[in-house]
Image (cartoon, grey):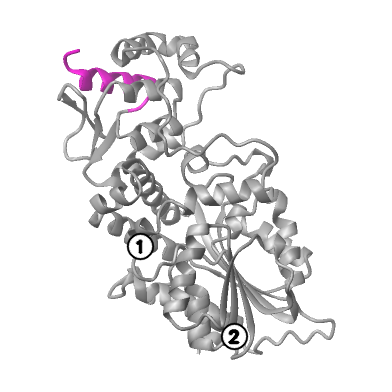
Amino acid sequence: MADAAGRLTKLAEQMLGAPLPVRIRAWDRSESGPPGVPTLVIRNRRALRRLMFKPGELGLARAWVAGDLDIEGDLYQALDLLAGMIWERPEPAAPPRRAPVLRALARPEIRAAAKELLSLAGVPLPPAPPAEEARRRRGPLHTLLRDRAAISHHYDVGNDFYELVLGPSMVYSCAYWGTDEGAGATLEDAQRDKLDLICRKLGLQEGERLLDVGCGWGSMVLHAAREYGVRAVGITLSEEQAAYARKRIADAGLADRIEIRVQDYREVRDEPFDAISSIGMAEHVGRDRYAQYASALHGLLRPGGRLLNHQIARRPLADEAAYEVDEFIDRYVFPDGELAPLGRTTGALEDAGFEVRDVEAIREHYALTLRAWVANLEKHWARAARATSPGRARVWRLYMAASALAFEGNRIGVNQVLAVRTPESGESGMPLRARAWRG
């Protein structure tokens, strides 16, 4: 097994059809590849078996989560270098139910390379997925029960963990940075500014009723009640989030003005509300349920009420039917989450009866936010791993770093859409001059 790194570099370049842009260090301490670039550390032969039995992104992610693979050097640079060769490279077509390793062996141009990989990988059995992978799901997408399980997988992993990653603001959505490149601003400042911007866009007034859909740990309802004097209802499907939010609200002395419920947006019946905020929640709704989502929120607002929908968007495809959810994200991060193009979101809101009044694209802000979260996680790595599990911490580090690059590269974006349930009179209540909330 001498010089495993050299053999792997040669195999990788043969199978990928391009030079390997990173350095490799193998379990036998051998190294190969260009100097001065990040090093892909292959800790054991099990990592190879994961890639053989699930080639592409998912196999690589499983090896990362299990600790079979690691990166030494700049993680962002490594992901950027590897993206076009592994994550964005289509897997070869194959007949149904054929194991990925058999697909590779069946390709004449890499048959010899596949045999060499088999000899390096050892026992030809597929390793079990890491424990952090979401349980197998059955039945229709986005039922009440299935959505609760999906939300629990992502959010019920320990409030102590999220405190370390998110910082004191406990806001798990794109912040709003007031200076170019975030210079001189803190994450907490940027999250406060985001919450305040949303309150101003909604035109909140003292005594009004606000519904925060997907309220997380309660930051939005706390800010709106404390700074704008509203009465607020926050809903979440996460028991851990709800318990944390209720304690924060009690500690702030605002329990008489804020209610937190473990409730689905489809179950809310105590309309009307003067305003609704939905911040980073609509990504969980699903394309087949989005019309229902838009219609439900429209029905919960009084005539003249406003909705602020803050949502990640993907780029539109020439064939929308070809859209597939990213395997790593679906298995480890956001089970059943789906992204939609901005046009589909605004179209669904208009179909439900909303008048869309303002759209603000803030994707660069999310890249800065994600880099701040990754920095928090790396700074508190040992405590974060203890607070949840080493595998879960590795999941979050990989997905947040990769997502930062996706926002920077305009592969995904995030938008704040302000919409109004304009009454039949046509008096929207919106300011005559656009974006008056800017001051």
Question: In the rendered image of this protein, does residue 211 appear above or below residue 368?
Answer: below
Residue positioned 16% across, 35% down in the render: 35
Mark 2 or mark 1: whose residue is earlier in sequence: 1
Residue 71 appears left or right of 180: left
Residue 311 appears left or right of 166: right
Q: Is residue 4 magenta?
A: yes
Q: Residues within 10 Å of mark 2 (few under 14, many from 20)?
A: many
Q: Secondary structure at mark 2?
A: loop
Question: In the rendered image of this protein, does residue 63 appear above or below residue 190?
Answer: above
The disc at residue 163 is 1
Q: Residue furthest right?
A: 424
Residue 100 appears left or right of 23: right
Residue 30 appears left or right of 14: left
Give coordinates of residue 239: x percent, y percent: 52, 58
What is the magenta segment's predominant secondary structure?
Answer: helix
Give coordinates of residue 430: x percent, y percent: 67, 86
Of marks 2 and 1, the one in the foreground: 1
Q: Secondary structure at mark 1?
A: helix
Viewer-side residue, 125 vs 257: 257
Q: Which quadrant is home to the N terminus? A: top left
Residue 38 appearing in the image: yes
Q: Which residues are magenta?
A: 1-18
Give coordinates of residue 5: x percent, y percent: 22, 22
Residue, disc 2? 204
Amino acid at pointer 1: Glu
Viewer-side residue, 414 vs 174: 174
Amino acid at pointer 2: Leu
Separation of disc 2 and disc 1 at Cα?
Answer: 28 Å
Q: Is residue 2 magenta?
A: yes
Residue 21 appearing in the image: no
CB-based contact (under 8 Å), mark 2 and mark 1:
no
Residue positioned 47% across, 46% down in the render: 333
